[in-house]
Image: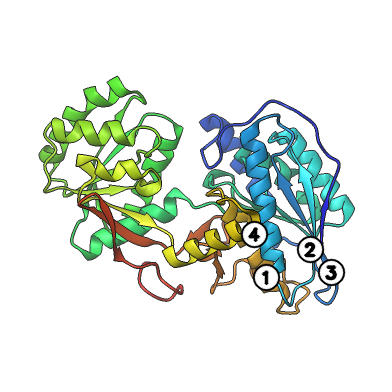
Amino acid sequence: MVTRTRNRITFNPRRAALRFVGAAALLALAACNATSVGGLSGQSVNPNKTVQIALLVPNGSGRESDALLARNLENAARLAIADQTNAKIDLRIYDTAGTPQQASNAAIAAVNDGAKIILGPLYAEAANAAAVAIAGTNTNVLAFSNNASIAGGNLFILGPTFENTANRLVNYGRQIGKTNILIAHADELAGQVGRDAIISASNRNGATITGVESYPFSQDGINNAARRISATVKETGADTLFVTAGPESDLPFLMTALPERGLGMDIQLMGLTRWSSQPQSLALPGLQGGVFTLPDQALERNFAARYQAEYSERPHPIAGLSYDGIAAIGALLTQGRSDALTSPSLTRQSGFVGTQGIFRLLPDGTNERGLAVAKIENNQVAILDPAPKNFSGAGF
């Protein structure tokens, strides 16, 4: 059953999905607020009765992009509920306008209406505000954000994190003997967070950071920095260049400028973003031989096909997160336990199977996803190391 609430209020529009939002200081404050809850969280349920779940979506901002995202998140949740044969779910939709204040109001209204767990919101600041607002009610929030700095306490994030991707690639690099890493990142928030994720992954996996090079987030800034980055690779003895650049922004400029300014083909290139999301990126000269990660391709294609058959359109890339949240909740409810929605159950070691492969929520509020390692060869994507099917195999 799906119910839509009347909680539409138009506020200022938010930024695009799955980008890090706000200033670094604000993100740090958000993380402190979210993690202050600590310990066991989550409401008890009667698994033999219908369990109410609230879905918070960014409708009401006045932006067409937010309306598109909201529709996709709601559609995917409906699709997931239809697949739950043994869990009784009453899904209620709350519009947040993509703002922290309205997300907070929506979360409070949802709990007052009887919600046992909240799915969403999308944007980092809104997700943090929602979790803080209902922390005293012992209700967990599964947000669609990928911003690890807000995770903790009663707030779990479902979005793929830089930490997860960096760990997979650094681990793979160690397996093939590539352990001396130079990092190149844009001098803006996403680049800085990506840099920190690579450093942490290197520390965990025994790799060495030979240096860190940043560049202004502009075409001229990249062109001016490219020669310095290429020279630093040689000077430091790095065998790997790990970049944070995205295919929709700085990656095309960086991967054109670096070969032109002396970067050799003997260096192993690694990327923190999904290079294949823009097919034209596969032809960039600097990307040939480079490696990046992909989710389980068979499961991703299956979800996209089912979504399109049901709704006559391709799903937005974030739609699967909504399906994953319902799938995880449904899997726990079918266990027939009253503590199904508490933090120990949500963070079970075996995890869950979602639209892009296996995933599990971690006690610190972040997540881990099974990823494949892919390589660009002759302008095509080749899978070097498939996505794992469980959390006991390679890649973790």
Q: Nearer the viewer, mark 3 or mark 4?
A: 4
- Residue closer to the observer: 267 or 139: 267
Please tell me whether mark 1 sits on a helix, a strand or a loop: loop
Q: Nearer the viewer, mark 4 or mark 1?
A: 4
Say which mark, if any, is on residue 50.
Answer: 3
Residue that carries the numbered disc 1 in the rendered image: 83
- How many numbered discs sit on the rendered protein? 4
First reached walking from the N terminus: tag 4 or tag 2: 2
Image quadrant where one finds the C terminus: bottom left
Q: Nearer the viewer, mark 4 or mark 2?
A: 4
* Mark 3: amino acid: Thr
* Mark 1: amino acid: Asp
Quarter of the view holding residue 15: top right
Image quadrant where one finds the N terminus: bottom right
Q: CA distance from mark 1 to mark 2?
A: 24 Å
Q: Residue at x 19, y 56 (%)?
A: 178
Q: CA distance from mark 3 to mark 2?
A: 14 Å
Instruction: Judge the density around disc 3: few (<14), some (14-19), many (≥20) Cα neighbours within 10 Å.
Output: some
- Residue closer to the observer: 47 or 365: 47
First reached walking from the N terminus: tag 3 or tag 2: 2
x, y percentage for residue 21? 55, 34
